[in-house]
Amino acid sequence: MALEYFDWLDYLVFGLMLLLSALIGVYFAFFAAKKQNTTAEYLMGGKTMGVFPISMSLISSYISGISLLGLPAEMYTYGTQLWTIVLSEWIVSVTISVIYLPVFYNLQITSSYEYLRLRFNQHVRLLGSIIFIIKMLLYIPIVIYVPALALSQVTGINLHMITPIVSIVCIFYTTVGGLKAVVWTDALQTIFMYFGVIFVLIYGTCRLGGIREVIRINQEGDRLDFFIMDIDPTIRHTFWTTVFGNYFSWLASCSVNQAMIQRCLALSSLRKARITIFIMAAGIFVIVSLCCYTGLVIYATFAKCDPLSIGAIKKSDQLLPYFVMTITGTIPALPGIFMSGVFSAALSSMSTGLNSMCGVIFEDLIRPAYNKPISERTASFIMKVIVVIIGGICVALVFLVEHMGALIQAGKSLAGITAGSLLGLFTMGLFLPWINATGALVGGITSTILVGWISLGTQAAMLRGEIVIAAKPVDVSGCAANYTLHASPTPETTVEFDRSGTFFMYRLSYLYYTFVGMVVCTVTGALVSYFTQPNDSSMVHRDLLTPVIHRWLPPQNIHCRRPRLTQHDIDLHAREMELLHLRTAYLDDNSIDSELLSPRNNIYS
């Protein structure tokens, strides 16, 4: 099949998506009733955002182009075991709603890492913020690389020309429009993302003769693996790694992530935040399942002529763009819709990352360094400069991503370096009141160094060929005669890993990295705290601990001070201010009935 390229209609659809994204940023920067010139508006949307845009924003933020391209490639190359990650996502949603969210919402913090200062001290907060920044600087370049790779393939334009163009659009609307622009752009891009995936999926399924035929071909090709029950932790994907291991990975990504906390606190109530989390879980369940099924459709299409083996593509992550352009390239606008979906997923993840990093850098690094208050005008300018600088750094780091392995594994491996230590820090703070600041600090640093060594060591071992991941068998018997075989059509090894002499920890499944990091962080923190005078549990305020453990705690010491205003106090203060305004208006022009302000109607009497 000859590869088609974009035509003018595809460019028009794709350009329309980018234009609408930029216009949303322009609207919130210059035409909205409330300008993005305060920290509350720029980072939290004035705490008046609705459930729908926040839900759509979270879905598109967590489903990046890595998922849209990487999941189909994973199904095609290694089978369907990874599909079972959707099971753990529902459990994570319940965990967040019950354990983590009530604490953060009650404290009403702008940066999730401000919690670490309230619970431990400024040094632990600084550690958490730096770990988060490192995590996003490792993640965002992969997010940028994905759409650039796909667009380069379908247009023929050089990848390194595309990368700056994509990023400039994203940096622009994130910089000028703040959280509201990011959230509403994410909502728009979520729609593009779903349409792009669904259109291609439906057309590919119909072309093959229906879902039954897709399943039959994949069953014959040994792609359907959902219950590999081997408990060996060095096997890349089993039922246990994808459900148990991914639970901790997903919990770290959602529960203590600045992007999640920032969006949930932009809602007006805890109830709305919980609804949003479950809508997000449903949306992610659907889009992940659609992406995985798309991988089955791609395999069914190329079951007798593997494009990687004949050199039609260079990496498995190019399978989906190749599939789209070969079977739908002649259908007007469909490739453009697909590419808009891939770019939408990537742009939303990048803009969320930039906005979240901006909040953390400003609130946790810059504001505490100032000895005097920062005006809202100055703060707004500083935050916009931060977005531009970190956006530029992320674009420069894209050049390193090309040399990494499969996108799904590379992304989760790098995320695991920091995810485990962050989850460990917050888990110690919420569940273990006797853990002190020294324990948290040592635990966080130890965990990050250990998992970083494992992750980077594994990547190096894979590049050296010491670790070989067995792919499923492929076939080229149905290809046309005029091709050159670029790769062996069958895997050279029949075992999951080459186990000859490779260090055990390098062979550990990447889905366990977060779990290992969390355990190391927590155990180290507990041991160090034990030997360095642990906290008195009665002196740690209940607002800093998850409600789940309150019943087992000793009585609160009367000298224990509340860390900051709770939501109840904030609401009470707002009502007091409203009453004060009413009284002032009455004294000014007698326009308010004195009966309304009489003592018996006073809400505090």
Image (cartoon, rainbow, N blue to C red):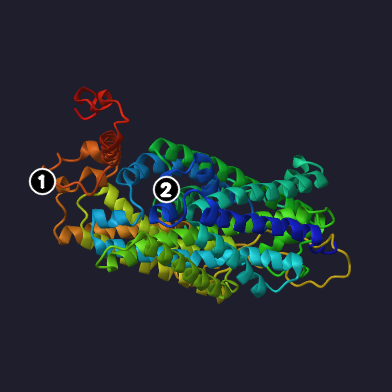
- The answer to whether 238 is drawn above or below residue 580 in the figure is below
Q: Is residue 530 visible?
A: yes
Rendering coords of residue 512 (x, y %): 45, 57
Task: Name the residue carrying label 1.
Answer: 559
- In this rendering, would 185 be left or right of 98? right
- In this rendering, would 66 be left or right of 510? right
* Near-viewer residue (49 or 277): 49
Rendering coords of residue 195 (x, y %): 69, 47
Q: What amino acid type is highlighted by mark number 1?
A: His
Quarter of the figure with the N terminus: bottom right
* Near-viewer residue (464 or 19): 19
Quarter of the figure with the C terminus: top left
Rendering coords of residue 58 (x, y %): 51, 48
- Mark 1 Cα within 10 Å, few/some/many (few <14, many 20+)? few
- The answer to whether 4 is drawn above or below residue 604 in the figure is below
Q: What amino acid type is highlighted by mark number 2?
A: Gly
Q: Residue at x 21, y 38 (%)?
A: 552
Q: Residue at x 61, y 71 (%)?
A: 164
Residue farthest to the right, as pictured: 481
**Residue 46's mark?**
2
Q: Is residue 87 visible?
A: no
Residue farthest to the bottom, as pictured: 464
- In this rendering, would 17 be left or right of 394? right
Which tag is nearer the camera, tag 2 or tag 1?
Answer: 2
- Mark 2 Cα within 10 Å, few/some/many (few <14, many 20+)? some
